[in-house]
Image: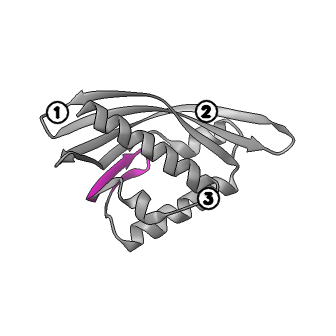
Amino acid sequence: MEPSVRKLFQRYESLFNRSLGGDTNMDEVASLYASEFIGAAPAGVMTGKNDDQFKQAMAQGYQRYRAIGTKEMRMRNVRLSPIDAHHCVARVAWTATYARKDQPDVAIDFDVHYFVQELDGEPKVFGWVSGDEQALLRKHGII
């Protein structure tokens, strides 16, 4: 399971960076996710379906990242905690780089825990737990 999950997040990183560059293929992005998912952050817990509304929300998210100066998302590490033969938690360490007006770029490290299910050799994200992204961006003067 580990090699395929690592490849999933390498693809995730590549698609994220392509989207930051304006080359957004929402069908490819959506293919990273299961048909339904759950997300949790300090703002609350949400559930969703991998549908056209999700693709639209993801496209708007990439547009917002570009608007606040996000230049790159780089994966530093992936650490897996197996749950059973088909499920794991992937703790992904990211570094996001932001351009700021009249100041040097800033790199921000953060972690996200993803719930991954692998069926028929194809891993998909079915959930995630993240920190307070807005507070972190404010702390570093991004927003």
Q: In this view, does 128 lie to the left or right of 111?
A: left
Q: Is the magenta stretch mostly helix, strand or loop?
A: strand
As measured in the structure, the alpha-carbon distance from the residue carrying label 1 to the one carrying label 3 is: 34 Å
Q: Is residue 96 left or right of residue 104?
A: left
- Give percent across and percent down for residue 50: 32, 64
Q: Hey, what amino acid is under mark 3?
A: Arg
In the image, residue 45 lies in the stretch drawn in magenta: yes
Q: Label 2's element?
A: strand
When asked about the image quadrant of residue 7, the answer is top left
* Mark closer to the chain start, 2 or 1: 1
* Mark closer to the chain start, 1 or 3: 3
- Give percent across and percent down for residue 43: 44, 50
Which residue position is annotated with label 1? Answer: 83
Q: Hey, what amino acid is under mark 2?
A: Ile
From which residue to which does the magenta span run?
35-46
- How many C-alpha atoms fall within 10 Å of the one at disc 3: few (<14), some, or many (≥20)? few
- Give percent across and percent down for residue 14: 51, 46
Q: Label 1's element?
A: loop
Which residue position is annotated with label 2? Answer: 108
In the rendered view of the protein, which quadrant contains the N terminus? top left
In the image, residue 19 lies in the stretch drawn in magenta: no
Pick whichever, 45 or 107, lies toward us.
Answer: 107
Q: Going 38% across and 51% down the picture, which residue do you hit?
A: 44
